[in-house]
Image (cartoon, rainbow, N blue to C red):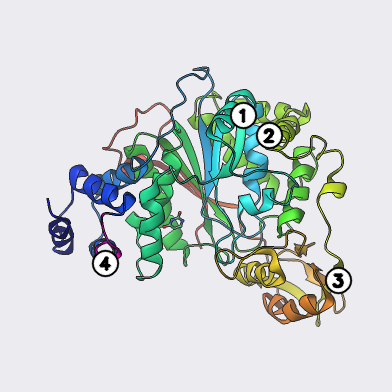
Amino acid sequence: MLIQEIIRRKRDGQTLDRQMLDLMMRGIADNSIGDAQIGAFAMAIYLNGMAHDEAVALTESIRDSGQVMRWDGLDRAAPVLDKHSTGGVGDLTSLVLGPWIAACGGHVPMVSGRGLGHTGGTLDKLESIPGYDVAPADDSFRRLVSDVGIAIIGQTGSLAPADKRLYGVRDVTATVESIPLIVASILGKKLACGLGTLVMDVKVGSGAFMPTPAASRELADAIAAIGCGAGTRTSVLLTDMNQPLADCAGNALEVSEALRLLRGEGQDSRLYPVTKALAVEMLLQSGMAHDADDAQRRLDHALDSGEALERFSRMVHGLGGPHDLAQRAEHYLTAAPVVIDLEADRSGVIQTIDTRQLGLGVVELGGGRRNPGDAIDHRVGLSRIAEIGRKVAPGQPLLRIHAASRSDAEAVTRRLRAAFTLGDAPVESPPLIHATVSPNPRAPMSRDVLSHDLTSHQEDLS
Ligand code: URA
């Protein structure tokens, strides 16, 4: 079939089948289809949407456009599972969750990304650790997943190669904001890692990828239904990004915070309950725990016994980092030379935080990229970020800036201060978990799973 006939079909509102989508994705991956046809294809989907089966087929075609990992040699009782987030600020859950699940007996082949826009990236955080190699040889990655239970690495060229080109064209043809394209892009890459279970963390709020709570919810429903349709048990937690999840944002600062949690400290943070809720869902959906109480007990034991921290240390060392990072973190995680507090200029209660602006502040300090290949400064970022509902007096800090120079710190103060809205009324912190969308843990996965087959516990999506 001619590629232009596939595009015509989609342009005219008809559905595409797996064969047509495979032809398209293969041609995108091997460069036999040009950017003009990719752009037209993406726009036809953007304008007409996709039926459920069609979106499942697109996800599978992207997944199968390159290598799909197989884990046949692993212990059958130890499931292969992962978590993925739509990205946020101060969201370091992956650094804690991966080793925590490994300590409970799971295998977590975590292929992560770099910072995108205002959001931080797990790979950039891990590269704060001297020697950490995010692109190890395939057999080292497999060995670590098999022996330690966790390895966090970067996207390889052989995993879902169609997505890389398709995403690049979408980015410059105003076709990023399409639910079926977003879902197929996210899940195509994740499912190529050979997962039995995936828990997605879709963020809601001022620092979220999706612009409104309703759009986050629509994405969550689509991810759960399409992931299950493609044969991977997929749940979604909608979690809050109306303020940074941790009270810090920035690469080395977030690795320090992850170590603190893995040591069993920081349980009064917002980060801890969200990470634990994601972990509970992973244990339940993968069948590693019978019920939520069982999952909590296993997770508490993995943390209290030091096993989760041990798995993190073994992963870091196995990927070229120091063997004693956990014991000598201050030695390895370089601090920024300039640290200054940003003080409130009036009294009041913090009503809202524009989380996106805080993330952009980190980028401006050098902790993220303005252009794709830019080097980043792992030392810089924000800490002690005051939370919504906190009462501040003039001169009291809203946050602490970690910068390469005093002038860099001064350059971001206006943006950071403007991110906080102060008022007189008392305010409650937004809920941490807005809703959960899960398949029935015992139901078989099939293409026919639709949103209405999924259980939804909605707390609040305002
Ligand atoms: N992240 C992805 O990987 N793909 C998208 O389309 C959007 C966000």
Q: Residue at x 34, y 56 (%)?
A: 181
Ligand 1 resides in the quarter of the picture at bottom left
- Spatial CA distance of label 2 from label 1 is 7 Å
Spot occupied by residue 45 in the image (x, y as percentages of width and height):
26, 61
User: What amino acid is found at the position of numbered circle 1 in the picture?
Assistant: Leu
Q: For mark 3, give the secondary structure.
A: strand
User: What amino acid is found at the position of numbered circle 3 in the picture?
Assistant: Ile
- Spatial CA distance of label 4 from label 3 is 49 Å
Above or below 315: residue 424: below
Q: Is residue 289 left or right of residue 264?
A: left
CA neighbours of label 4 inside 10 A, class few (<14), some (14 to 19), many (20+): few
Q: Earlier in the sequence, mark 4 or mark 3?
A: 4
In this view, the mark in front (3 or 2)? 2
Spot occupied by residue 69 in the image (x, y as percentages of width and height):
44, 32
Q: Quadrant of residue 315?
A: top right
User: What amino acid is found at the position of numbered circle 2 in the picture?
Assistant: Met
Q: Earlier in the sequence, mark 3 or mark 1?
A: 1
Along the line of sight, which residue is nearer the eye, 66 or 441?
66
Q: Which mark is residue 36?
A: 4
Spot occupied by residue 327 in the image (x, y as percentages of width and height):
86, 38
CA neighbours of label 3 inside 10 A, class few (<14), some (14 to 19), many (20+): some
Q: Where does the magenta region start and end?
A: 32-37
Q: Earlier in the sequence, mark 4 or mark 2?
A: 4
Q: Which residue is mark 3?
A: 340
Q: Is 45 contained in the magenta span?
A: no
Q: Is 35 contained in the magenta span?
A: yes
Spot occupied by residue 318 in the image (x, y as percentages of width and height):
69, 33
